[in-house]
């Protein structure tokens, strides 16, 4: 119950902070900075900071790669950039539509960057916006204050190049895999491939697109053979080949087991209850996402001839 | 009233209005008492008109649904009858209700003694965290419900992510299959798969700013030896590519037939021959 002073209605104190604490980042290579999110679902304890995000500094300007789960986190990322360089932010790139990667975008609108994403990103974001915002409110409450959708102003279908001033970023869209709007960013100078959620390390991969498409994309990622990959979730500096192999193993086993279940005439629920039970200790957040993965793979594969 | 009192009054009214608006939004939580949820009470009173519903009906009918379904558009559920159908005692109808869906009444499934079990498995859309209920009506007119709480979101408003035109063009492929051997007099499981967008009409295409119209399967009639064994009256609460598993009791040779009708009055049929002696089956499907 709020107290009321005569002549006014007491309002909640405005949320503008005098100084935002900068997000913790590590420098993976000269000019390449990344923040490791918590390996968790969005909670009040972690403030929705559950994805790996970061930025690349050129001689002219800075590209941000994903902005986190809330406006607050986006502001903290911006403060981290300011600690490192005064250069303007010219690009804010979203690797895909999921809320933990996009809801910090609004922290950068004052910089007037181009917001960059796959050509299918805008549609995907907008159609999920209402339910994302509802869940954000429910799970994070006041921590999500001011978090709004900022869709792409520049879209990529296939490949594109961004110039940060003597530093080129190569962007690429992919066959539907984690989502139908996955985009990777390759920094030529350091040989760093930001994979977005095409790569999960130690955290269970989440299928919100196509399991078969993802297996194809994994093969293509391996063929790119970059010196370094920055995953969307999990430790930032593990050797990527082993991580990609582990992810492929999980998805390929899922396909194998779902196909077997379908041949045996099992129900979706039976498949969900029995497939991959032995995987539990290998992946963080297995309990949250594995059964949903089986559901997605089952719905995708049951119409195969 | 003086200025100060009037201001205080206005402030209190504003706070009360905000509070009331939040109550009217009626979020459901797993710790709520399911029997008192307003949408359920309205539906119960309207449909069952004061007839008592035994809310601990798990001895008659059991609803299984995942506690957390991250894909709100495809939530597998099973409504399992706890006793076999006999002419003396059988479940004649099962209602499905999802409190927080834009259309909470997901549909009904009608059964007969010939159904073997009044059991139905399918996948549904869930829009928000909600109670989900299966209500069974037995042939003596009694009502029993089984309730689960499901955490899911966006099942009704999020599009399938597939091309609407392609999904519509492919609609109507039907697969009807039997599971296992047919033994005369022993209930046998069958599965009906329908290729269909089962659109809610609530997903806006953000590029065209149009809502793809609602387009969904509204009725499924399955009969064996020309007697109905499962009749589903459903709506877009059923997920894309509707999938139903249900039972029937094979006796002599005969055909299990399914007729599917959608909201554009399209009809799709499928039939499978039932040969209880040998257990062999042939499957035929046609698209009209």
Image: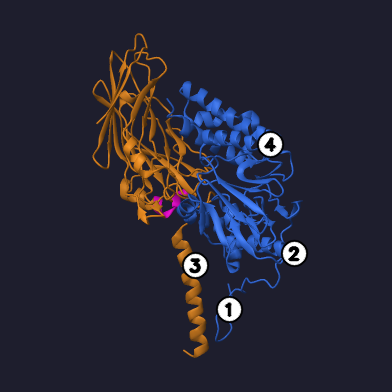
Q: How many marks?
A: 4
Give the spatial CA distance, label 2 vs label 1.
Answer: 36 Å
Badge 2 marks a residue whose secondary structure is: helix
Residue in the picture at 25% in, 24% down:
B227
In the image, A33 versus A100, the foreground residue is: A33
Q: Are marks 4 and 3 in contact (CB under 8 Å)?
A: no
Q: Position of residue A76 (x, y in %)?
A: 68, 62
The chain containing the residue under callout 4 comes to: A
Badge 4 marks a residue whose secondary structure is: helix
Residue under pointer 2: A83
- Give the prevailing secondary structure in the magenta stretch: helix
Give the spatial CA distance, label 1 vs label 4.
Answer: 53 Å
Q: Farthest bottom residue?
A: B2
Q: Residues within 10 Å of mark 4 (few under 14, many from 20)?
A: some
Chain letter matching colour blue: A
Give the spatial CA distance, label 2 vs label 3.
Answer: 43 Å
Residue under pointer 4: A243
Give the spatial CA distance, label 4 vs label 3.
Answer: 49 Å
Q: Which residues are magenta?
A: B33-40
Of the two numbered discs 1 and 4 on the same chain, state the one appearing first in sequence: 1
Q: Nearer the viewer, mark 3 or mark 1?
A: 1
Pointers 1 and 4 within a single chain: yes
The chain containing the residue under callout 1 comes to: A
Q: Nearer the viewer, mark 4 or mark 3?
A: 4
Instruction: Determine the image quadrant of residue A198.
Output: top right
Q: Are marks 2 and 3 in contact (CB under 8 Å)?
A: no
Badge 1 marks a residue whose secondary structure is: loop
Q: What is the drawing colour of chain B?
A: orange
């Amino acid at each position: 119950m709020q107290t009321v002073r005569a002549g006014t209605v007491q309002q909640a104190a405005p949320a503008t902070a005098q100084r935002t604490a900068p997000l913790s980042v590590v420098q993976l290579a000269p000019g390449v900075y990344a923040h490791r999110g918590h390996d968790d679902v969005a909670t009040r304890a972690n403030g929705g900071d559950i994805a790996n995000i970061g930025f690349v500094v050129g001689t002219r300007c800075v590209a941000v790669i994903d902005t986190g789960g809330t406006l607050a986190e986006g502001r903290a990322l911006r403060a981290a950039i300011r600690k490192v360089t005064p250069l303007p932010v010219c690009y804010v790139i979203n690797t895909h539509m999921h809320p933990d990667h996009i809801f910090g975008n609004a922290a950068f609108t004052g910089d007037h960057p181009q917001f960059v994403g796959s050509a299918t990103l805008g549609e995907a974001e907008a159609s999920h916006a209402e339910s994302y915002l509802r869940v954000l409110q429910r799970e994070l409450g006041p921590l999500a204050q001011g978090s709004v959708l900022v869709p792409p102003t520049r879209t990529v279908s296939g490949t594109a190049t961004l110039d940060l001033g003597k530093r080129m970023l190569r962007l690429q869209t992919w066959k539907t895999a984690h989502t139908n709007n996955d985009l990777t960013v390759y920094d030529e100078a350091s040989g760093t491939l930001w994979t977005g959620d095409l790569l999960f390390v130690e955290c269970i991969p989440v299928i919100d697109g196509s399991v078969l498409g993802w297996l194809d994309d994994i093969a293509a990622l391996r063929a790119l053979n970059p010196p370094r990959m920055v995953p969307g979730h999990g430790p930032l500096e593990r050797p990527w080949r082993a991580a990609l192999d582990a992810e492929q193993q999980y998805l390929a086993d899922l396909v194998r087991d779902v196909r077997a279940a379908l041949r045996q005439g099992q129900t979706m629920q039976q498949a969900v209850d029995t497939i991959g039970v032995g995987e539990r200790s290998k992946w963080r957040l297995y309990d949250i996402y594995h059964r949903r993965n089986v559901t997605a793979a089952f719905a995708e594969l049951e119409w195969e001839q | 009233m003086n200025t100060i009192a009037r201001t205080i009054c206005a402030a209190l009214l504003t706070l009360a209005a905000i509070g009331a608006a939040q109550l009217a939004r009626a979020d459901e939580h797993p710790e709520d008492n399911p029997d008192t949820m307003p949408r359920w009470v309205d539906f119960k009173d309207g449909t069952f008109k004061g007839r008592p519903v035994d809310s601990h009906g798990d001895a008659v009918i059991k609803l299984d649904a995942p506690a957390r379904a991250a894909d709100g558009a495809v939530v597998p559920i099973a409504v399992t009858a706890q006793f076999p159908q006999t002419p003396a005692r059988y479940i004649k109808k099962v209602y499905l209700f999802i409190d927080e869906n834009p259309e909470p009444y997901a549909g009904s499934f009608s059964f007969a003694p010939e159904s073997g079990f009044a059991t139905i498995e399918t996948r549904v859309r869930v829009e928000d965290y909600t109670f989900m209920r299966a209500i069974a009506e037995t042939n003596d007119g009694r009502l029993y419900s089984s309730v689960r709480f499901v955490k899911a979101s966006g099942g009704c408003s999020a599009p399938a992510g597939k091309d609407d035109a392609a999904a519509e063009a492919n609609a109507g492929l039907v697969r009807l299959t039997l599971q296992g051997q047919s033994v005369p007099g022993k209930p046998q499981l069958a599965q009906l798969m329908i290729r269909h967008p089962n659109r809610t009409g609530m997903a806006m295409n953000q590029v065209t700013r149009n809502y793809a119209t609602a387009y969904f399967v509204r009725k499924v009639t399955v009969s064996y030896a020309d007697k109905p064994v499962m009749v589903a009256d459903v709506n877009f609460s059923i997920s894309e590519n509707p999938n139903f598993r249900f039972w029937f009791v094979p006796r002599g040779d005969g055909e299990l037939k399914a007729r599917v009708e959608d909201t554009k009055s399209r009809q799709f049929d499928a039939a499978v021959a039932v040969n209880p002696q040998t257990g062999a089956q042939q499957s035929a499907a046609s698209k009209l």
